[in-house]
Image: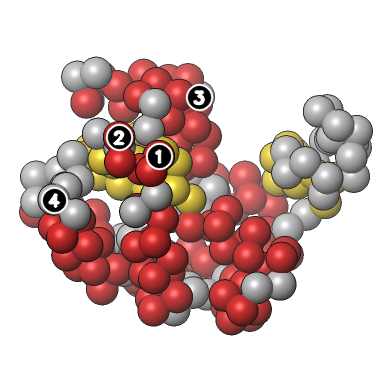
Amino acid sequence: MNIVLLGAPGAGKGTQAEKLVDAFDIAHISTGNILRASVKAGTPLGLEAKSFMDAGELVPDSVVIGLVKERLKEEDAERGFILDGFPRTATQAVALASELEELGRNIDYAIAVEVSPEVIIERLCSRRLCKACGYIGSKGDEACPLCAGEMCQRDDDNPDIVRNRLDVYTKSTAPLIDYYRGADLLIEIDGIQSPEDVFKSIKKAMKA
């Protein structure tokens, strides 16, 4: 099973991706996680991407497409995958379709988790990240509940950058909803529900 997961930053895609990975034993391909790991490691790819990520801008297609192409060829992706954070533009969607065709594969579902901008701004500005283990919590967490590490706010989770990220999403990524609707692959889900209810809605729509 091959899935594209769509939704604005803060819509809860990462949480649903984890649930889908556990349920269907497929690979979780998160371009955000891969890019952040590259930034932390100081790789050439990470250095190229960092300035765009810090400003809440999309990383250039040439960087992301190359990264995803290589990831799709890894062994764990052969039994299926969920793409979280890719494609984000029409160019990326066309490149993905072309790459999958070469591999003799296709997208089964494009799941769009929909949440209002007001809710997303509140979610992201309240989010905190453990510097040690990567646990994602809220501003109420004085220390990481998993490892007692220091909690911090990501640079791109301040209000101005969050609003810019939403503007970028609306202009560049939201049109993908129509792209996948036209291909009869789209499932639209209300992301305001609890994570558990969102997942139940996804499984119901997939008849899984």
Q: State left or right for residue 197 relative to residue 43.
A: left
**Residue labelled with disc 1:** 76
Q: Which quadrant of the structure image shows residue 109?
A: top left
Q: State left or right for residue 130 relative to residue 37.
A: right
Q: Select label 3 or label 1 by which is in front.
A: 1
Q: CA distance from mark 4 to mark 1?
A: 16 Å
**Which label's residue is closer to the chain start, 4 or 1?**
1
Asked whether the beta carbons under mark 2 and mark 4 sit within 8 Å of each other, the answer is no
Query: What secondary structure is found at the residue carrying circle 4?
Result: loop
Asked whether the beta carbons under mark 2 and mark 1 sit within 8 Å of each other, the answer is yes
The numbered mark at residue 104 is 4
Where is the N terminus found, in terms of image quarters?
top left
Residue kind at label 3, given as amino acid type: Ser
Residue kind at label 2, given as amino acid type: Arg
Camera sees residue 123: yes
**Residue labelled with disc 2:** 79
**Residue labelled with disc 3:** 194
Camera-side residue of 157 and 32: 32
Query: What secondary structure is found at the residue carrying circle 1?
Result: helix
Query: What secondary structure is found at the residue carrying circle 3?
Result: loop
Camera-side residue of 28 and 85: 28
Q: CA distance from mark 2 to mark 4?
A: 13 Å
The numbered mark at residue 196 is none
Q: Position of residue 26 (x, y in %)?
A: 37, 33
Residue kind at label 4, given as amino acid type: Gly
Residue kind at label 1, given as amino acid type: Asp
Q: How many marks?
A: 4
**Which label's residue is closer to the chain start, 3 or 4?**
4
Q: Position of residue 21 (x, y in %)?
A: 43, 30
Residue drawn at x 45%, y 75% as measured from the top left: 63
Asked whether the beta carbons under mark 2 and mark 3 sit within 8 Å of each other, the answer is no
